[in-house]
Image (tube, rainbow, N blue to C red):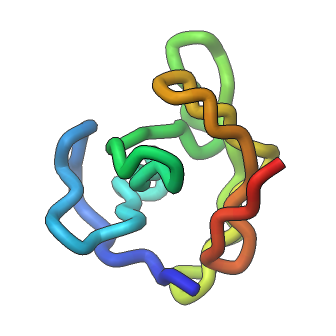
């Protein structure tokens, strides 16, 4: 299980530090390491939206975050969920 490593004032893609899995930017963005490639990915947390209009809900749990709906990582094609701090493949 992975917890939120850090809550940042601002961040952008490529801001994850070595060893970090999840970073929240002021409850607007979630940065995470793709479980397939280790690449840094970013999704918008509701009510914030990605450029294509998509957004996800974070349950607010920093110790064992859950994000809904599922994530489809455009860079590598990984599809799955973050549930209680774990990546779960679809």
In the image, is residue 35 above or below residue 73? below
Q: Quick one: which residue is furthest to the front in this view?
A: 36
In this rendering, the count of numbered labels is 0
Q: Quick one: which residue is furthest to the top in this view?
A: 52
Image-quadrant location for residue 88 = bottom right
In the image, is residue 77 above or below residue 37? above
Residue depicted at 16% across the width and 63% down the height:
17
Image-quadrant location for residue 14 = top left
- Residue 79 in picture, x, y percent from top left: 71, 39
Residue depicted at 64% across the width and 73% down the height:
86
Residue depicted at 34% across the width and 77% down the height:
5
Q: Is residue 35 left or right of residue 72?
A: left
Q: Is residue 58 left or right of residue 20?
A: right
- Quadrant in the picture for the N terminus: bottom right
Q: Nearer the viewer, residue 81 or 27?
A: 81
Q: Nearer the viewer, residue 86 or 37?
A: 37
Q: Nearer the viewer, residue 45 or 20?
A: 20
Residue depicted at 35% across the width and 54% down the height:
25
Q: Is residue 86 left or right of residue 5?
A: right
């Amino acid at each position: 299980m992975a917890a939120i490593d850090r809550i940042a004032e601002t961040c952008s893609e490529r801001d994850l530090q070595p060893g970090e899995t999840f970073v929240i930017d002021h409850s607007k963005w979630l940065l995470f390491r793709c479980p397939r490639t280790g690449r840094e990915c970013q999704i918008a947390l509701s009510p914030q939206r990605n450029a294509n209009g998509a957004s996800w809900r974070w349950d607010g749990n920093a110790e064992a975050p859950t994000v809904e709906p599922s994530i489809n990582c455009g860079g590598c094609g990984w599809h799955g969920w973050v549930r209680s701090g774990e990546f779960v493949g679809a």
